Image: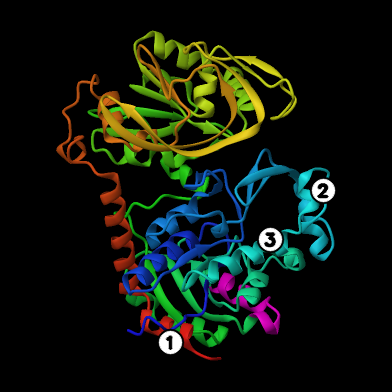
Amino acid sequence: MNHEVNLHPIMFAGTGSDVGKSIVAAAFCRIFKQDGYHPAPFKAQNMALNSYATPEGFEIGRAQAVQAEAADIPCHTDMNPLLLKPNSDHTSQVVLHGKPIGNKDAYDYWGGKGDEGVKGGKDNSSSFDFRKEVCDAFDRLASRYNPIVMEGAGSIAEINLKDRDLVNMSMARHAKADVILVGDIDRGGVFASVYGSIALQTPEDRKLIKGIIINKFRGDMRLFDEGRKMLEDICGVPVLGVVPYYKDIFIDEEDSVSLEQKRRRLAEGKVNVAVVLLRHISNFTDFDTLERDPRVNLFYTNNVSDIQHADIIILPGTKSTLDDLLELRRNGCAQAIVRAHRDGKTVVGICGGYQMLGQTVDDPDGIEGGVTSLPGLGLLPIHTVMTADKTTRQVSFQFGGHTCQGYEIHQGVSDTDEAVLQTGHCIGTYIHGFLDNAPVIDYILSDKGKMKSEAFATAEWDPRAFKEEQYDKLAAHVRRYVDIDRIYQILKSHD
């Protein structure tokens, strides 16, 4: 293969949210890397509470960090220049080039005419032209990597927002990208969603759509042979692959939609780990490694009985610490956690969950909203004050004589210098990725009366090697079911 050839940028756009765009993009980042290219991911604008700290200490969406990892390159803010982190149903924190610049109401953000909908506002964000910022970020990235693997957002057929679009077809036009439309057959209605997504494009944008990938197929692939031909006939676009649903490949998820499948219950013969399901839960990928440990049954819940009967209770990160702490007191979960701790259960708090386990959480400047102060659960000797400045950095820390890795993304300052604070069987930390480290996992499971799994023993468990294996398995899965040669032809063509 001639690796000196520049490939067009490729965009994986969707018929809707959660159709698998992020995972397909990660697969192609790994495929291009395996084939000798130097790819990089790009998503102009991401709306997610799962985020990650770059090596420089800036914040981007977790999906682009995963895709960069699949491409075997360091993540950078140019890969996701604009990140919206929802504060509520109506407002989001705006993170531009890795740093928060203010909050925006959804109507303020989308409600203007044309480009005005992505300018304007009553805070720092009013001074930025978001379209120019994301296009400049793409141009910088494209000057260093080949090809750029782009990801769209939601559906490409939201025609009411089309003139304000930053991330889908307008970005594809700027990048001169070949667009591959991804449809989810598992949810039903794939013919209508694919055909409608293409039919609703302008003639100019329709020409950019060079192929279709049908994702999440279940059952006998031969049953879709006729459907594939019918879809090509009505859309006038080739179906480049039909990718089956998989269960044995573990890639970090971007969306909290995936948590709906994880609301399991207590199980006999395993260590039951209850992650408290907060309304504003963030960075829930913190628990993926622990969930895969064969000793563990991990589930998400806000059921008081489940919390009291679990062996380990985890309070996760949150975008709104005070609001979620208030809700925990209202729904009885706070009292259930305290009782479980009193009964000898292990309690772990990460980031916002760590703040909640302290004595008090104060927000005198209203950084998070109208609640200015609340008592914490009182299980750790810390006091937290919310601040406008956000800490974002990658960190190393010591645990049980081992050097471990993680990252911090949080607002608020607590009165301790300890990276990991432990009092008896209560542990708190600001470090995301805390539970990706085998020494930590083995420690919290060690007193639960379960045999240590050899596959996850400290000496043998290598999270980096495991992730590499998963990316390779994902690439092999996609290679098997997608016409990769045809995609290379498209990306090299002069049309």
The answer to whether residue 331 shows anywhere in this view is yes
User: Residue 267 bears which disc, if any?
Assistant: none
Disc 3 marks a residue whose amino acid type is Glu
Frontmost residue, 222 versus 142: 142
Q: Nearer the viewer, mark 3 or mark 2?
A: 3
* Vertical placement of residue 318 versus 478, above or below: above
Locate residue 478: give its quadrant. bottom left
Do the residues under discs 1 and 2 have CB atoms within 8 angstroms?
no
Q: Which residue bears the numbered disc 2? A: 121
Give the extent of the magenta segment: 191-205
Decide: few, some or many residues near mark 1? Use Cα within 10 Å; few <14, some 14-19, many ≥20: few
Quarter of the rendering occupied by the N terminus: bottom left
In x, y percent, where is residue 99? 63, 45
Q: Amino acid at mark 1?
A: Gln
Q: What residue is drawn where x is 41% and y is 66%?
A: 29
Number of residues whose C-alpha sits closer than 10 Å to that of mark 3, classed few (under 14), some (14–19) or many (20 or more): some
Q: Earlier in the sequence, mark 3 or mark 1?
A: 3
Give residue 489's mark: 1
Dot 3 or dot 2, earlier in sequence? 2
Main structural element of the magenta stretch: helix, strand or loop?
helix
Q: Is 92 located above or below residue 488 in the figure?
A: above
Can you identify the residue that label 3 sits on?
Answer: 133
- Residue 165: image quadrant is bottom right
Q: Do the CB atoms of the residues marked 3 and 2 lie less than 8 Å apart?
A: no
Q: How far apart are the two marked residues, 3 and 2, measured between alpha carbons?
A: 16 Å
Cα–Cα gap, marks 1 and 2: 44 Å
- Residue 198 falls inside the magenta stretch: yes
